[in-house]
Structure formats: C-alpha cells, structure tokens
Image (cartoon, grey):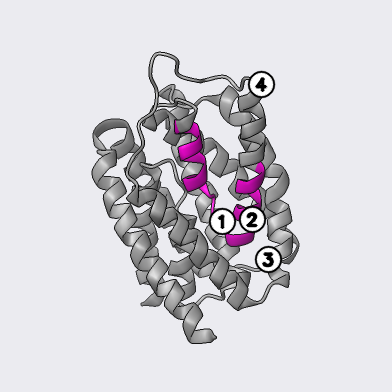
Amino acid sequence: MITALATGAILVVSAVFVTLGLGGGILFVPILHWTGHDLQSVAIPLGLLLNGLNTLLALLPYGRAGLVDWRGGAPIAVSAAATAPLGAGVQPWLASETVLLLFAGAVVLAALRALGGTPKGGGPDESTGPGTGRFAVRLVVGAAVGFVGGLLGIGAGFLVVPVLVALRYPPRRAAATTALVVTVCSFAGVAGYAPTLDLPVGPTLLTVAAVLIGSRIGTLLMLRTARPAWIMRGYAIVLAGVAAMLCGEVLARL
C-alpha cells in the first residue's frame, strides 16, 4: 500500500514538475522518506535518479521543439556536474537531523520563490549566449546548484529558472533550458552516490515507471496546453505544506 501511494504521488509530481522545467526531487525525496525509506541512503539518491530521469525525458522533446538554449545552458550544466558529486560525498557524513533541516530550508526557499509568481522574461534583446559577465554568473549558479543537488537529492531547478529569466529568457525557454541543467546535475549526483548505492529493487522499478508516465504527460502539457500561472500557484501551495511538515518533523526530533 505504501509503495502504491508513493508511486501514484510520484507520477503526479513528475507530470506537474516537467511543465516547470524541474525534476521533482524536492517532492520525490519527502514522498520516499514519508513512505518508509531511509532519508540518506535511499530517499535522496533515488530521488536524484528519478529527478534526472524526469527531466531527461522532458529534455528530448523540448530540444526537438527548439526551446532549449544548449549554448547558454552548457556552462551551468558543466559547473553543476563538477560539484554535484561533492555534495553527494558530504551528505553521508551529516547527521540525519541536519540533512532534514537543510532539506526543509530548501523547500521553504522554493516555496517563497514560487509564491512570488512566474517572473516575466524575454523581450527584443533576449539572451541566448553566455557573454562574458553572464558566463561567470552561470558558472557560479551551476556550482551552487550542483552541490545543493548532490547533497539533498534535488535538481535545484528553482534556483536556475529565476536566473535564466533575469538573463531575459522567456518562461518556457527558461524552463526547457533548466531541464538540461537539472538532468546533468541529477545524474552527476547519482554518480557521486554510486560507490555505496543500494536501492530497493521493487520501489525503484515502480517509481521509475511512474516517472516515465508522468514525464510524458507533463511534456504534452508544457508543449500544448499548460498555463504556468495556475501551475505555479498550486506548486507554491504544495511546497508550503511540505515545508511546514518537514519543519514540524525537525522540531519533533529536537
């Protein structure tokens, strides 16, 4: 029953998060944790795996649709790939309460960002190339995103999207390019956990299947009928609830 609940929830999360260019790890990890899987040894690395798979499956049609800025997203992705294994290496050395507190903080930040609404981007001078100053910004953002992603099992796309929008990307192009960064970051983080990775076979197969289905649904929504405004409002409400529950769990452990 627990596995069925986790699988269904992950399917829905996959579909919704793909429309935002995000992987879903920020909800995959709590779902796995609350359905009985160890936070540090299972929920975080499995969440990363599902996160990367979700955005990879979205990245392919986004690329075919011409939405991904490969040149502009590459510096962020490469920088994230370099630091994600570092975060994965640090995580097992931290106390579970510390990891839970850091994760709760990340969810709070994501919720606050989402509550701010969908920022406007693009314009006649839309940025699609790295540029000198922009290149440095992308490297720094990628390094932060990679470390946080590897440490907490999230793609940290909620940090990438506003940066790309600030660089004058339209929202859909920002979401699609973020999918590139999150995919690379997530799989690099999984590689960091590889030496000690021991995931349960049944739950892994079921949740991977859920992501395969959910990602396809979300991609169709993104490319055809999605309305980012209402999706972001729902996303913000869910994150706020998850943040409250995680903070409550942290307080209960103190």
Total numbered labels: 4
Residue in view at x 33 percent, y 55 percent = 236
Residue 62 x/y as whole percent:
43, 30
CA gap between label 1 and label 3 equals 13 Å
Residue flagged by tag 1: what amino acid is it? Leu
Report the side of 200 relative to 34 (left or right).
Answer: right
- Residue 33 appears left or right of 14: right
Distance from disc 3 to disc 4, alpha carbons, whole Å, reads: 33 Å
- Name the residue: 38% across, 31% down: 172
Rounded to the nearest angstrom, the CA distance separating label 4 from label 2 is: 27 Å
- Report the quarter where the C terminus lies: bottom right
Callout 2 amino acid: Gly
Q: What kind of element bears circle 1?
A: helix
Say which residue appears at 52% left-offset and 40% top-offset: 160
* Element type where label 3 sits in the image: helix
Count neighbours of disc 2 (C-alpha within 10 A) and say few if under 14, some if 14 to 19, many if 20 or more. Answer: many
What kind of element bears circle 2? helix
Residue occupied by mark 1: 48
Q: Label 4, secondary structure: give it.
A: helix
Q: Nearer the viewer, residue 116 or 130?
A: 116
Q: Which residue is mark 3?
A: 91
Q: x and y percent of residue 37 in the render?
A: 52, 75
Tell me whether circle 4 and circle 1 mark residues in contact (CB < 8 Å). Answer: no
Q: Residues within 10 Å of mark 1 (few under 14, many from 20)?
A: many
Q: Are marks 1 and 2 in contact (CB under 8 Å)?
A: yes
Q: Earlier along the polypeptide chain: callout 1 or callout 3?
A: 1
Q: What residue did someone put label 2 on?
A: 150
Q: Residue at x 50, y 78 (%)?
A: 250
Mark 2–mark 3 CB contact (< 8 Å): yes
